Amino acid sequence: VQLQASGGGLVQAGGSPRLSCAASERTFRGYVMGWFRQAPGKEREFVAAIGWSGDSTIYADSVKGRFTISRDNAKNTVFLQMNSLKPEDTAVYYCGAAPRYYISRYYTEYDYWGQGTLVTVSS
């Protein structure tokens, strides 16, 4: 599975960008999809994940209520709507695909990764 993330850039605090991650695989609907992020000097951390149908989602506490993950299986794309951005949200955001039947917040369980898209939040 090849993943292509997009939608990052320079955003003011309080902004609401939407990240997209397009998958090449026609069996996209069989993958749990997740978003992770890595800030400079820090380890990659979980942001959000979504199950096959899109009905099940989980979020990191730091983004709960501000970020929304969704997917369009017809377009092989997963989205991350980010609202009320804070400077501490600045990071490279990665999308991952996991051939699992359960949603996971552990990056080691994701087998495929996109190249990452940088989100910089200015105060």
Image: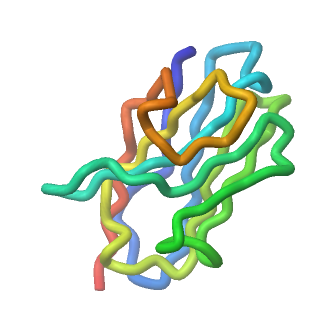
Colour mapping: rainbow
Seen in the picture, residue 63 relative to 37 is either above or below; the reply is below
Image quarter for residue 100?
Answer: top right
Residue visible at 38% across and 53% down in the picture: 45
Residue 82, percent from left and from top: 56, 67
| Viewer-proximal residue among 26 and 101 | 101
Residue 44, percent from left and from top: 32, 48
Number of numbered labels in the structure image: 0
Q: Quadrant of the C terminus?
A: bottom left
Seen in the picture, residue 78 relative to 15 is either above or below; the reply is above
The answer to whether residue 69 is left or right of residue 44 is right
Residue visible at 68% across and 34% down in the picture: 32
Extreme residue toward the left, this view: 41
Residue visible at 49% across and 22% down in the picture: 111
Seen in the picture, residue 121 relative to 21 is either above or below; the reply is below
Residue 96, percent from left and from top: 52, 34
Q: Quadrant of the N terminus?
A: top right
Residue 102, percent from left and from top: 71, 36
The answer to whether residue 63 is left or right of residue 123 is right
Residue visible at 58% across and 54% down in the picture: 48
The answer to whether residue 44 is left or right of residue 108 is left
The answer to whether residue 65 is left or right of residue 112 is right
Seen in the picture, residue 84 relative to 5 is either above or below; the reply is below
| Viewer-proximal residue among 31 and 102 | 102
